[in-house]
């Protein structure tokens, strides 16, 4: 087995290199003669591999002769196109004389389709032929389904995956001068992800290593893309379509890898995704001139594109998280997904499908490795924002946010909880576990229940003293997800899209009141049902779970991510703006009686301001902020979650967040407010009324 592989590997490498050079030649093709030559060479490679495939299908002298003749016929027929193109160009050259200019290739799309189709046929034949030569004969078991699984096996083989990834990397390198650096890096990462397919080698070490490294490469790819779109608000339409299509392919690829690892064996979904990625890549690289040729448009005005971007990223992340869960903790997750069979009556099938889908999604989004992966991904974007931020207080809050996510979303509920209570059920399946779960009950010690109440008391006290930012901008997982650079830039949708616009401002709309009432009402009902259930009064379960466990899984394992994906329509920080988070609603009540507010050092500066940058930067869409600052010199809203973007956005350094610290300083007679970040502007004198002197700028504005 080793000898054939060692002999075939150089041949496969040489063919991959030859194909990459043909791809570069195709990308540089501008004339019909050159296009015909490229097609001829690709057809010749297909004919050679086709002849070899005939031999390996039934090894014999007869099949060897048949394969040779079929390959010869294919190459002989294909050379006709080159000969015809050569004669046509020769006639035009003779007619035009020394001033002859070769005509431009008109059928560019047909040429690209032919090149991509021939490359795909070449790779499929090489995958099957080389597998057979190496001792693994892939055969169809009969029927359409058998043919599908045969193609799936070919695509999942190392001869297809490794060769294809090599062709992608080499062709991208050869054309690096014709594509942008960003596209070049994305192409290389794309080829690396294909190379790291776990199906390629049937060895535990390769499967584990490829899952880990491919997941890391995927995270790098997504972070790089998100940071790129943050830095470039105007995007080329071809590039925009390409990245969304590629993310859709990645989503299918991750789902296929998960199904492959969960059920074992090749899956058509994975192979179809690999083929789609290959077609997408070569269709793009054969026509590199299309990128950057169109009119760039602001992606912040394209909610459908932004929604597709987030949706496909999320689907890819869910299956990547499930793949990591299975690989790292097979004893915990193997066989636990999709437990109910899709059989029986229609109602039974529908119920089982909903049950399986609900607990699969809730189980993955609440798992250690999904949250770790999301923390690394979104945390990187938040770190980039940290580097941009100049306000010390905001930098400290961002650092606390990243630390709290690592502690409260990953370490304590997963790693620490499992280590201390190895025989206990998963933390997300315990009805009472802390403030994020609400007030539920179960057969737990009274000390645990008292600990839950203590968490409410502590967080409530902190909210009174420092505002709901303690929860909504530090402790919760939401600020890490919402405040990274690219996601933070999506707060522009708060002011442009429906229904996000319905929730602008501090006023509680009817929709907001209804949503908050339903959320808090469901929390109360689920808690009461859980208490009665634990007391033996009745037995109530929702999808076979305690009501509070179901509620937590629904709100924070599913609904939260649905709302995250729909940011282009529902707006950024929609858990706050729409009032559907019961933890935020409770924190909102504490903030109403607290010290937290936004204050201006000099309201005259706010009166003269025409930028409204504070309102534009608010991720919660508090557009009435400037009016309050102009009239009162301060702004107080229970919707405000203390992100502090308004403080940094003020061009005059005139705003600061006031809490119990500033209240205490005022009471003891020390500094009433912190010094300005920068020099306040000199305000232009207002026009004086008849018979009155002109109004001068305020003393604060003239200071320093």
Image (cartoon, rainbow, N blue to C red):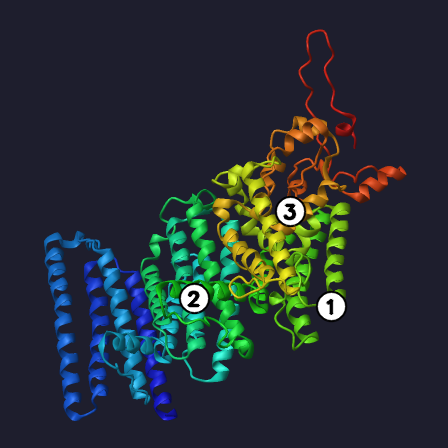
Task: Give x and y (percent) for residue 80.
Answer: 12, 69
Label 3 residue SS: helix
Tell me whether circle 1 and circle 2 mark residues in contact (CB < 8 Å): no
Residue under pointer 2: 352
Residue under pointer 1: 445
For the C terminus, the image quarter is top right
Alpha carbon distance from label 1 to label 2:
34 Å
Task: Give x and y (percent) for residue 238.
Answer: 37, 52
Horizontally, residue 485 falls left or right of residue 406, namely left
Horizontally, residue 108 falls left or right of residue 521, namely left
Q: Residue 585: which numbered mark, if any?
A: 3
Horizontally, residue 298 falls left or right of residue 78, namely right
Alpha carbon distance from label 3 to label 1:
28 Å
- Point out the tag, 2 or 3, that comes first from the N-terminus: 2
Name the mark nearer the viewer: 2 or 3: 2
For the N terminus, the image quarter is bottom left
Alpha carbon distance from label 2 to label 3:
33 Å
Q: For the view shown, which residue lies furthest in the front direction?
A: 537
- Point out the tag, 1 or 2, that comes first from the N-terminus: 2
Tell me whether circle 2 and circle 3 mark residues in contact (CB < 8 Å): no
Q: Nearer the viewer, residue 285 or 647?
A: 647
Residue 594 falls in image quadrant: top right
């Amino acid at each position: 087995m080793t000898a054939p592989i060692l002999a075939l590997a150089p041949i496969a490498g040489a063919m991959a290199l030859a194909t990459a050079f043909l791809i570069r030649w195709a990308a540089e093709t501008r004339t019909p003669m050159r296009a015909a030559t490229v097609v001829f060479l690709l057809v010749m490679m297909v004919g050679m591999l086709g002849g070899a495939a005939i031999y390996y299908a039934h090894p014999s002298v007869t099949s060897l002769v048949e394969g040779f003749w079929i390959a010869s016929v294919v190459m002989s027929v294909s050379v006709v196109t080159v000969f015809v193109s050569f004669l046509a160009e020769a006639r035009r050259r003779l007619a035009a004389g020394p001033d002859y200019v070769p005509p431009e290739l008109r059928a560019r799309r047909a040429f690209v389709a032919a090149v991509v189709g021939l490359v795909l046929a070449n790779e499929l034949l090489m995958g099957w032929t080389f597998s057979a030569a190496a001792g693994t004969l892939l055969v169809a078991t009969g029927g359409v389904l058998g043919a599908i699984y045969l193609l799936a096996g070919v695509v999942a083989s190392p001869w297809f995956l490794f060769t294809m990834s090599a062709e992608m990397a080499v062709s991208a390198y050869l054309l690096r001068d014709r594509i942008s650096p960003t596209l070049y890096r994305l192409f290389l990462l794309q080829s690396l992800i294909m190379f790291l397919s776990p199906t390629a080698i049937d060895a535990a070490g390769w499967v584990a290593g490829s899952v880990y490294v491919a997941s890391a490469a995927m995270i790098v790819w997504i972070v790089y893309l998100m940071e790129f779109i943050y830095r470039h608000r105007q995007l080329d339409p071809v590039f925009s379509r390409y990245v969304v299509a590629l993310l859709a392919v990645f989503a299918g690829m991750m789902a296929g890898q998960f199904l492959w690892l969960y059920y074992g064996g090749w899956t058509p979904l994975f192979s179809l995704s690999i083929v789609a990625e290959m077609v997408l890549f070569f269709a793009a690289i054969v026509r590199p001139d299309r990128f950057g040729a169109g009119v760039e448009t602001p992606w912040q005005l394209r909610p459908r594109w932004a929604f597709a971007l987030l949706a496909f990223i999320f689907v890819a992340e869910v299956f990547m998280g499930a793949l990591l869960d299975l690989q790292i903790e097979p004893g915990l997750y193997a066989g636990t997904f999709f437990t109910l069979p899709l059989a029986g009556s229609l109602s039974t099938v529908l119920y089982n499908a909903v049950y399986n889908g609900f607990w699969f999604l809730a189980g993955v989004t609440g798992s250690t490795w999904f949250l770790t992966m999301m923390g690394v991904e979104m945390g990187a974007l938040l770190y980039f924002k940290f580097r941009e931020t100049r306000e010390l207080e905001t930098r400290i809050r961002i650092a606390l946010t990243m630390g709290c996510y690592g502690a409260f979303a990953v370490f304590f509920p997963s790693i620490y909880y499992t280590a201390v209570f190895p025989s206990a059920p998963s933390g997300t399946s315990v009805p009472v576990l802390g403030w994020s779960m609400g007030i539920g009950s179960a057969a737990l010690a009274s000390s645990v229940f008292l600990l839950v109440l203590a968490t409410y008391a502590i967080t409530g006290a902190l909210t009174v003293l420092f505002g709901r930012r303690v929860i909504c901008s530090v402790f919760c997982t939401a600020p890490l997800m919402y405040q990274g650079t690219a996601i933070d830039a999506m707060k522009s949708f708060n002011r442009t899209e429906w229904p996000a616009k319905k929730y602008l401002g501090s006023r509680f709309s009817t929709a907001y009141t209804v949503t908050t009432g339903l959320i808090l009402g469901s929390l109360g009902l689920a808690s009461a049902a859980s208490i009665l259930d634990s007391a033996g009064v009745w037995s109530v379960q929702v999808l076979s779970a305690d009501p509070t466990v179901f509620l937590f899984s629904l709100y924070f394992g599913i609904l939260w991510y649905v709302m995250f994906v729909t940011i282009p329509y529902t707006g950024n920080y929609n858990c706050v703006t729409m009032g559907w988070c019961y933890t935020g609603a409770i924190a909102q009540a504490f903030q109403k009686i607290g010290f937290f507010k936004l204050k201006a050092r000099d309201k005259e500066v706010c009166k003269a301001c025409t930028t409204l940058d504070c309102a534009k930067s608010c991720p919660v869409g508090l557009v009435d902020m400037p009016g309050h600052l102009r009239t009162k010199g301060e702004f107080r809203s229970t919707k405000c979650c203390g992100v502090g973007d308004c403080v940094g956005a003020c061009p005059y350094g005139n705003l600061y967040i006031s809490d119990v610290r500033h209240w205490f300083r005022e009471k003891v007679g020390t500094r009433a407010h912190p010094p300005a970040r920068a020099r306040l502007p000199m305000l232009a004198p207002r026009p004086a009324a008849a018979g009155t002197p002109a109004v001068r700028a305020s003393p604060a504005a003239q200071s320093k």
